Amino acid sequence: MKNRKFVLARRPDGTPRPDDFRLETEELPTLGEGQLLVRNQFISVDPGMRAALDDVVSYTQPVPLGGVIPGATVGVVETSNNPKFKKGDFVAAGFGWQEYGLSDGRGIRIVPDGPMPSSTAIGVLGIPGLTAYFGLLSVGRLKEGDTVLVTSAAGAVGTAVAQIAALKGAKVVAVAGGAEKCQWLRDEIGVADVIDYRGVPDLAAAIAAMAPDGIDVLFDNVGNAMIDLTLPMMRQGGRIVVCGQVADYNIPASRKPGIVNTSAFISHRLTMSGFVAFDYAREFRTAWGEMTDWILEGKLKYREDIAEGFEKLPEAFIGLFGGKNFGRKLILVF
Amino acid sequence: MKNRKFVLARRPDGTPRPDDFRLETEELPTLGEGQLLVRNQFISVDPGMRAALDDVVSYTQPVPLGGVIPGATVGVVETSNNPKFKKGDFVAAGFGWQEYGLSDGRGIRIVPDGPMPSSTAIGVLGIPGLTAYFGLLSVGRLKEGDTVLVTSAAGAVGTAVAQIAALKGAKVVAVAGGAEKCQWLRDEIGVADVIDYRGVPDLAAAIAAMAPDGIDVLFDNVGNAMIDLTLPMMRQGGRIVVCGQVADYNIPASRKPGIVNTSAFISHRLTMSGFVAFDYAREFRTAWGEMTDWILEGKLKYREDIAEGFEKLPEAFIGLFGGKNFGRKLILVF
């Protein structure tokens, strides 16, 4: 049996390009004791994964040259020598950009049968959804009545943040890029206060107009310039959740914008914190339960942007940085 | 009776200059019901007070043009119509740069008789000491075994931070400017790892050499450039305490350095928080007790830099920004 995989051909210089990735084919080894073989059905592409392609230790180790590109996967167990998994089980894992994954069972979990499509295990009920949930509630310490500013609000994380904040009694101001995304946030997601950052002459003024009393929680997926712009509008005791930096990942350090308006940290007792969802792994079960209920009740909506065909992976990933993707970007392999 | 006071003549442009301040003389009004009159013995000058001279709301309201320059004071009650205070009591207050203070008793406290000199009520046992105590223990959540980097370590706050950190079982790396201050930190304060930032070609490398395993708590009194330089050296779960920004107060926003290395917030789960000591006012009594014990046991040392003469106030304040002061800067009025 053959496995196809995309490996890192060279480290991207700025925005990734197609020839930073190389498609390889290999023989699959025979299954060892305790191992299982999974055929990947969906593979995700995430902007946050960009950091792992540089040769610096980030929240993941750097991908070695020739190594498989990382990504969340959901797939079907083909064969199993592991008593915890049986043929036909759906499992969520992080096999990366390859058609098959071989595992001893560690770090993968069975996706329970139920009303939710398998793709949600790496979407609204996977890391993006869990990132929204714990980033907003645990890191951001959201309280009823808070005003929340969420950026990249039409992305998988941002859309969940906007809805969870509203469910918890917060006022939400959402920033997204482009009329189509903003329209969708208003009409489908039900966020009243949406700003198209591409369509306003002064983003800070637009935010101030929608949040005249200031912001309690900034949930940021964009980067330094966005945080700097928001700092003077933060309220006493405000929290800045550093979730993602999609505008900064491809910029060399020497040209990155900086956060200047830090006097607000003292004057307004601000706290800025970074995190990744895995920090809260012991509480995932609680989050899954609550979020599944919300989804089934129609209170937590999500959008998946599914491209078909394994070979579409590099193109889909590169497209994330052009502001074109809209919802959780997944590749359907079969 | 006459009162002399320094008022704000104009808002400073960058580093304050002598003619930003104006000396005025006024008649003291007759004491009203419940009021008391205090003759100030010591008046403090603080770098953090610079922010209040600009026309922006900071952690204090801006000083109006013609308003008395703020400052901590300790003095003696001259006359009192307030049953809580009697003639001869020493009181700590915030009367600012004037010889006398008139009050209804709110916001001032009696300095208890005891072994400590009255000046310490606005020094090591005043806001600087309390800032060190709560900034390190409550905001910085110091744990035994942590590595702490403290900047402006020869200042009133920094010196206390270095010693409290050591008392709590942390490893301390101290940064100060000039050989004399560094020698004093080593010989008098007992900090083994001291860096003279003016005397090293590469401050980051010097810090890394003294803290090869990284930094758990950065207690910063300097500003954005110092924080940016330290971020790549922070350990997992590190805390950045934004206490002061002496290098940034006099720089217009358009020319301030920014914090660029924010990817460390996500990769290393960092938290950066601003605060002022007054946020912990309900716990001051605990801190005073513990700190007084430490001082009497010789474990918490402090240095006061006392200039004599009321008219020295502007010069003493301006000198804070030249890196010349060394210890808590106070003016002895009488």
Image (spheres, coloured by chain):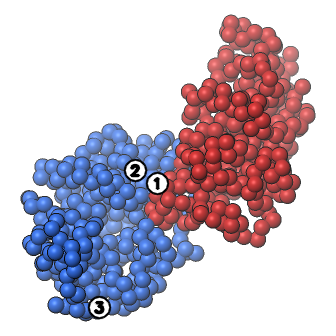
Chain colours: A red, B blue
Q: Is residue B73 above or below residue B236?
A: below
Q: Are the residues tagged 3 and 2 within 8 Å (C-beta)?
A: no
Amino acid of disc 1? Ser
- Near-viewer residue (B328 or B213): B328
Horizontal placement of B92 versus B267: left or right? left
- State the SS at label 1: strand
Q: Are the residues tagged 3 and 1 within 8 Å (C-beta)?
A: no
What is the distance, in whole Å, between disc 3 and disc 1 at their CAs? 38 Å
Can you identify the residue that label 1 sits on? B273
Amino acid of disc 3? Leu
Residue drawn at point x = 74 percent, y = 28 percent: A121
- State the SS at label 2: helix
Q: Of the residues under marks 3 and 2, which one precedes in the sequence?
A: 3
Crowding at mark 1 (Cα within 10 Å: few <14, some 14-19, many 20+) = many
Percent position of residue A50, x then y: 71, 45
Residue drawn at point x = 37 percent, y = 56 percent: B279
Amino acid of disc 2? Val
Q: Is residue A87 above or below residue A56?
A: above
Q: Are the residues tagged 2 and 1 within 8 Å (C-beta)?
A: yes
Q: Is residue A99 visible?
A: no
Crowding at mark 3 (Cα within 10 Å: few <14, some 14-19, many 20+) = some
Q: Of the residues under marks 3 and 1, which one precedes in the sequence?
A: 3
Residue drawn at point x = 84 percent, y = 42 percent: A316
What is the distance, in whole Å, between disc 2 and disc 1 at their CAs? 7 Å
Q: Of the residues under marks 2 and 1, which one precedes in the sequence?
A: 2
Crowding at mark 2 (Cα within 10 Å: few <14, some 14-19, many 20+) = many
Percent position of residue A23, x then y: 85, 34
Can you identify the residue that label 2 sits on? B139
Q: Which mark is residue B23?
A: 3
